[in-house]
Amino acid sequence: MEWLSRFSFHRKLQFSFLILILLPFIAVTFWSYSSVKQNVSDKLARSNEETLTVIANQIGKTIDSISFASVYFAQSYNPDILQSFRYLKDAESFADFETYAHYSRLKSMADILAVQSMDANLKMIIVNREQKIIMGDGSAPVFSALTEQFLRESGRLDENETTALQWFPSGEAQFAPEYYYASRFIIDPRNHEKLATLFIGIPKAYFHSLLDTGNPDIVFSLTDRTGEIIALKGGNEASAAGGMLVSKVSIPTAGWVLSGQTPRRFIESHINREFLVSLSVVGLFFLAFLILSMLWAGHVNKPISLLRASVKQYVGGKRDVRIPVKGKDEVAVLSAAFNQMLDDINGLLHQVESEQEEKGLLELQALAAQIRPHFLLNTLNSIKVDLLLGGDQVHGSMIDALMKLLRVYIHVDKPLDLAEECKVLGSYVQVMQIRNRLDIQFECVLDKGTDAVMLPRLLLQPVVENAISHGFSSRPAAPSILLEASFDSNLLVIRISDNGRGMPEDKLQRLNRRLLGTEDETLWPEKGVGLINTARRLQVLYGYRARLTAEARAGGGMTFTLHIPVTNDKEAVPHDDPDADR
């Protein structure tokens, strides 16, 4: 980033406008375009599916009407209808009136059934065994023969299939047939003899009327279960360029599939037009903002340049340089503050010169302060030697213990292993028992490995002091303090027990709440300060897992337990444990 230092603040401000505003604007624009494009495609796909579902339902109703008519004729138990089929099965002309009567009966029933699907303009034909039309729609005379083309188209029918509709296309047309016929054989239920064949044709115009949505670019196609096209509406070669958005709906009653294909390029062109208009409007505002912001940056940079020039003059030695203050805007406030700062700097310079003169005196005093503790220890050591040589073991030992405590206090900021801490506590107990005229028995029991754990100095001293000052205030006959240390999983557990006067249960519970930090300390500002400070020290040094608790000792007295986290190497975990702040 060193190359940025070659540019002025004004240029950096202009670059920041370009990078922090223009680039995000471009990124958001492309993201918005992609998102809008996808959303529009999804909405259009859902809309096409809904349209296809409506069309498929209408086609399904027509197929249901055809199926009903075929079932009525093919499985009719009306003796009159069956008698008419039996009479006309081999007829080739109106030979007599009875032939006409049977024809009229079938024609009347066909007209009644055709009413259900009148809007579809279905073409219904019944052909007897001689391939003569015994009932038609008027486009071909009765008892006329089927055309050769129709016979070829219907030749694919399976004559063994008598229970289900069979479909086939009829008529030559571009892309789709003129009619799509449903066929069913009419069988005599008495002797299972074939009486006639029913053909019901759906015209191409019916499909086109359903598939016409007014948009010639959307391609609708209807295919049968084999994939052959039944009907096709819309589309051209140019529409297929750029891919298609395809939606499909099935018609389960016939196994047909209705699909709609929308050219993606038309979707994208519509989105592009709207997005281009929005982008142009936003771009104009952005361009205006960019120009105004750069002009404003130049206006703001002018007093900053003046400020920079003034700083150079001040650094060059011109201490009386000041910036003219004009107006009440932020720049004027900054200029006034800068002038005040220069005045303060001049004052500080004079102050620093006087402080430097005092610094030498302070260093000499610090050296003298370091000499005093060593002088005191040397003096106490001389007194101890004189006492021991004079045979005064009691006071000599007391002086020796006091010297050990002083050494610890001098280096209180350095950690100490638990074994050495126990020795320091022994010296402290020795001094306290002479001071309080008590014969205190102090014992340390350390499990393997606990003696090498490093702890802050004098961490345990307030607990021992509490046992002597409060526990032994009743002056028991044989006062004793026991320190035990062991490992519990990844915790160092230190128990300090005494056989003093103990504590009532209510006060013990209150003390534990104070040690855990759940009691308001303002209620007890002068009680148990040493223990409370030790508990706080544990939490500050080792985090939330470290704690100090108190409990009554069996047989009288108190037991204080410290829980200190340790690592796998049995070293105390410092407060920078990532879980310490929980």
Image (cartoon, rainbow, N blue to C red):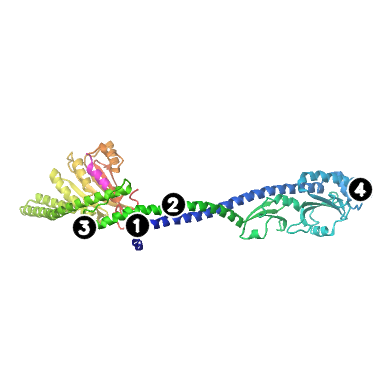
- Horizontally, is 141 left or right of 33 in the view? right
- Horizontally, is 201 left or right of 39 in the view? right
Which is nearer the N-term, disc 1 or disc 2?
A: 1
Give the x, y percent position of residue 128. 86, 53
Main structural element of the magenta stretch: helix, strand or loop? helix
Which is nearer the N-term, disc 2 or disc 4?
A: 4
Checking the image for residue 175, the label placed there is none
Three-letter residue code for mark 2: Phe
Task: Tell me the residue that label 4 is attached to.
Answer: 99
Q: Nearer the viewer, residue 184 or 499?
A: 184
Label 2 vs label 3: CA separation? 42 Å
What range of the chain is rendered magenta?
526-537
Checking the image for residue 9, the label placed there is 1
Three-letter residue code for mark 1: Phe
Q: Looking at the image, can residue 195 be seen?
A: no
Which is nearer the N-term, disc 4 or disc 3?
A: 4
Task: Tell me the residue that label 3 is attached to.
Answer: 317
Q: Residue at x 20, y 52 (%)?
A: 346
Q: Residue furthest left?
A: 390
Q: Quadrant of residue 507?
A: top left
Residue count near mark 2 (Cα–Cα under 10 Å), binned few <14, some 14–19, many ≥20: few
Label 2 vs label 4: CA separation? 93 Å
Label 1 vs label 4: CA separation? 109 Å
Q: Could you tell me if the residues under marks 1 and 2 are in contact, i.e. CB atoms within 8 Å?
A: no
Three-letter residue code for mark 3: Gly
What element does badge 3 sit on?
loop
Task: Tell me the residue that label 2 is attached to.
Answer: 289
Residue 535 drawn in magenta: yes
Which is nearer the N-term, disc 1 or disc 3?
A: 1
Give the x, y percent position of residue 443. 21, 50
Residue 267 drawn in magenta: no
Give the quadrant of the N terminus. Answer: bottom left
